[in-house]
Structures are given as C-alpha cells and as structure tokens.
Image (cartoon, rainbow, N blue to C red):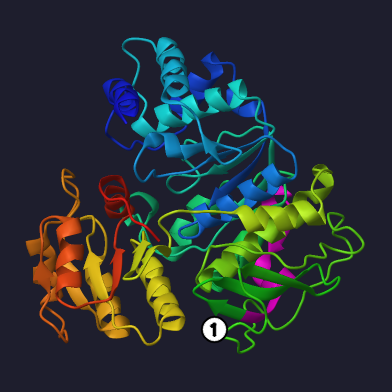
C-alpha cells in the first residue's frame, strides 16, 4: 500500500480538489500525451447505478474472447490500483507511478490544475496504451457530458445503465437534467445501448440518438428476460435480444431445480421489439446456455441483460467473441463490494449502495435472498447523500438492529451522532446505536446476538472494511 500512497501523493500534489465542469483540462493533457485514449477500441459506460457491475460483465467477456482488455472504473475500495484492471489483474504501483510522472511532466506552470479524477484518468489511459490494450471498458466517474472519460475517440458502443436521482449538486435536481448529462455521451454513428430505466427517459434517449444519428437499443424494449430465478448462490434467467431465439442464461452456481426464488418473472418487458433493419445481429442471435456468475441479487439480472445487449450490438466488430467466450466471461465476472458475501457463518454482507435507488435494490435483494434472516445493519454515509431516505428504506423493509458508524479519517463522512439524529425521526424495533469504529460496530452486533449483518451506505465504508479486516467467506 505504501507505493500506492506515493501515487496518491503525486495526484494530490498536482491537482485541485474542486470539481470544475469542462473537458478543456483533460483534453489538453491528453493532446500533449499523444491521445492515448485513442489507442484502443472502447465501450463507454454511464448511469447512476449498475455501471460497475455491467462493466465487470463486459470486461470479463472481452477478456475471455482473447482481447487484451482494460477495465477502468471508480471509485476504488482499498487502493487506486483497483481502478484499472488488465484482463482482471491490477498493475504494479511502479507502473502507475511511472505513468503518473509522465502525465505530470507535460503540465505547464500557471495553467489551471486538473482535478484528481482528470489526472488519474489521463494516467490510466497512458497505462492502457503501454499495456497494448485492445478493448477498454471505461466507466464514467460522474455524469457523462463533462466527465473526464468523455474523450474516447474510438468508442464502439455507449452503454447507459439505470438512471435515478444522485449528485444533484453537479447534475441537476430533476431526472431529466441528470439524464441529459448522461445521454450526452452518445456519439455520432455509434450504437447506444440504454437499460430503459427510468422508462420515462426512453423518448429523450431516442431523440438524442436521432439527433446524433446513433443506433438506439433500449434493453427494456429490444430484449426480453424470462423465468428469472435467484438464490444466494446466483441468478438464472432466459434472455432474448433481437427477437431471434430464446436462450437459457444462468448466472450463478445453480440449476433450474435448486432452491431459491423459482417463480417465473419477466425481468424487462412482456414483448420483444424486432427490427429487421438492425444489421448488428447475426442470423441466429447469441444462443447462450449455462452461464454462471457469482454476482447475486435480482438487480444483477438487469445489469447482465444490459451487458449482453451491448455485446450483441458490437459482436460483428469483434469477431473473436463467440458463444463459448461469452459463457466463460459471464462465469468469471467479479465485482467486489456489491452484495458481496464475505462471511457465511455468521452471514456478513458488504454492499456499497449509497443512494436511494441503490439502497432500495439492496433491501429488495436481502428480503428475497434471505427471507428468514433478521439482520443487523452497520450504516455510514457521506454528508451530501440522502441518508434520511436511505434510513427510512432500511427501517421499512428490513426492520434491522441499526448500528450507525462513520468512515474514520474521512471528513466528508457523517458522524454517528448526525446519523442518530436523523434515525430518530423513525420508529425502530430496537433503539439505534452509534459506534465510532465500523469493525467495532460489526463485533457489537455479533455480540448482541445477531447472526446476519449487512454493512452498507457508502463505498468508502466498504473500502475501509476490506482494507482493515480480512473476512473469510
């Protein structure tokens, strides 16, 4: 970790802590570096929730297909080295530091400093060029239009996950304003694949695609998910895109007879939109069978469907993608800190859901996966988040024993007493407790007799827990 601390010191010493809209700074840096972001084909992912999981699926598929793949994501949990994975593996801190020095070397005294994220993004692009990346799976950091990642010159597909209210201080306070920032990444002549959530945004998405002459694909209209089955070991469902053949897709180590939620469930829409004018589909479609992944929770079915739809949009451009490589990629997809079971006895789950929609999905998943469990919740949040709404969701749907904590060393994190005041607005089965140190909150919950614990509310909290404690699943 010490070397990555050195890397972060470089970034902090040569960046501003302000978020200033605009692509001028990142564009200037990349121009001087020879535009490394154009050395590879890319898929650009934006959205409010689900970006990382969708990116993990896509990265794993392309890597399994024989393409040297770089997956750039944010934020990191324990180390900035997590933000760029090459074929699923992190690069050494020495490589990061060397690339960071090269980026800093082209900066000119007196110019407006880049942000931390802009400097980190430029460094990641330099590394991707040096590592001879063929396909980059690039997750936006914030918004889309002015995000430092919105500079990709060889984008094969714009991928847009679900959109909901978050980061209102930067993106606007309405769903339409937030969506406008994210749809702005759609590029002329490039396929654009939108989850279709929120469905009220589909007309806006189609209009943006029409204006930019981009081929629109709305998963909720152009793909079909049926017979969804979920369990703590994984998910299973049937998937169809393009109206050509219904294919069994299984995510997780289960089969159709395994215990879990087995009731048929239409995941996206009742019907299928078929467009014979769409040249991106092969005659027989994808034809997927027996796909397995450890990513759990019903919402991961939607993320998987978005990833599969994006793959279907670009398959002809990437001929090494086959049925077998898609199956292998879905099998190997991993994404830490999202409904991650880190201990089974006692049951301990880490989840980075930090906004209303994310916590809502967490609650639904927990109730479906472990209906008989009475959970304790260890909760922390950033001050700028809607933690009142999140606490209300947790109380309404989980009725947990609540332990409120913070992220030590992070000024932006709310303190336990702040969270306690907000929690006091609701009636709890057990009086909420404030604990300053997160791992002590977990131990207290276990000592109080709880045999199932969820740690949630902030990815920074999850990162702290993973850095400070070794869990054994």
Which segment is the magenta one?
Answer: 210-228
Left or right: 205 in relation to 391: right
User: Can you say which quadrant of the picture contains the N terminus?
Assistant: top left
The structure residue drawn at horizontal position 45% and vertical position 17%, both measured from the top left corner, is 103
Front residue (pair 394, 196): 394
Q: Which image quarter: residue 200?
A: bottom right
Q: Position of residue 451 (x, y in %)?
A: 27, 76
Does residue 194 appear anywhere in the picture? no
Left or right: 423 in relation to 141: left
Label 1 SS: loop
Left or right: 81 in relation to 186: left
Q: Which image quarter: residue 453?
A: bottom left
Front residue (pair 306, 274): 306
Q: Is residue 215 magenta?
A: yes
- Circle 1 sits on which residue? 260
Instruction: Farthest residue to the bottom: give it.
Output: 263
Left or right: 279 in relation to 391: right
């Amino acid at each position: 970790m010490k070397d990555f601390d050195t890397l972060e010191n470089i970034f902090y010493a040569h960046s501003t802590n302000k978020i200033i809209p605009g692509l001028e700074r990142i564009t200037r840096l990349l121009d001087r570096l020879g535009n490394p972001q154009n050395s590879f084909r890319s898929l650009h992912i934006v959205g409010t929730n689900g970006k990382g999981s969708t990116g993990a699926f896509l990265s794993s598929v392309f890597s399994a297909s024989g393409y040297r793949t770089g997956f750039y994501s944010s934020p990191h949990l324990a180390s900035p080295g997590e933000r760029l994975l090459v074929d699923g593996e992190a690069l050494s801190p020495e490589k990061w530091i060397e690339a960071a020095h090269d980026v800093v070397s082209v900066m000119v005294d007196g110019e407006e400093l880049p942000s931390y994220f802009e400097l980190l993004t430029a460094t990641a692009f330099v590394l991707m060029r040096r590592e001879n990346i063929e396909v980059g799976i690039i997750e936006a950091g914030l918004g889309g239009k002015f995000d430092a990642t919105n500079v990709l010159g060889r984008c094969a597909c714009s991928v847009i996950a679900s959109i909901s209210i978050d980061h209102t201080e930067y993106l606007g306070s309405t769903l339409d304003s937030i969506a406008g920032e994210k749809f702005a990444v759609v590029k002329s002549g490039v396929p654009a694949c939108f989850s279709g959530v929120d469905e009220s945004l589909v007309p806006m998405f189609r209009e943006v695609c029409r204006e930019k002459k981009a081929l629109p694909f709305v998963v909720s209209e152009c793909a079909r998910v049926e017979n969804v089955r979920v369990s703590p070991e994984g998910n299973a469902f049937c998937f169809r895109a393009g109206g050509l053949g219904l294919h069994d897709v299984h995510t997780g180590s289960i089969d159709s007879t395994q215990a879990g939620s087995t009731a048929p469930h239409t995941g996206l829409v009742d019907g299928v939109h078929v467009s014979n004018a769409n040249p991106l589909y092969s005659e027989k479609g994808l034809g997927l069978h027996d796909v397995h992944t450890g990513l759990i929770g019903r919402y991961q079915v939607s993320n998987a469907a978005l990833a599969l739809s994006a793959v279907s949009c670009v398959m002809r451009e990437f001929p090494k993608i086959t049925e077998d490589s898609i199956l292998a990629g879905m099998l190997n997809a991993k994404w830490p800190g999202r409904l991650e079971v880190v201990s089974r006895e006692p049951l301990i789950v880490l989840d980075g859901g930090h906004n209303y929609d994310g916590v809502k999905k967490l609650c639904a998943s927990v109730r479906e996966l472990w209906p008989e469990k009475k959970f304790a919740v260890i909760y922390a949040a950033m001050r700028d988040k809607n933690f009142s709404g999140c606490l209300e969701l947790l109380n309404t749907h989980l009725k947990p024993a609540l332990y409120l904590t913070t992220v030590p060393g992070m000024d932006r994190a709310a303190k336990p007493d702040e969270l306690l005041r907000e929690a006091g607005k609701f009636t709890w089965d057990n009086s909420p407790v404030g604990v300053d140190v997160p791992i002590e909150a977990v131990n207290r919950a276990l000592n109080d007799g709880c045999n199932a614990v969820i740690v949630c509310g902030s990815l920074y909290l999850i990162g702290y827990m993973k850095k400070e404690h070794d869990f054994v699943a």
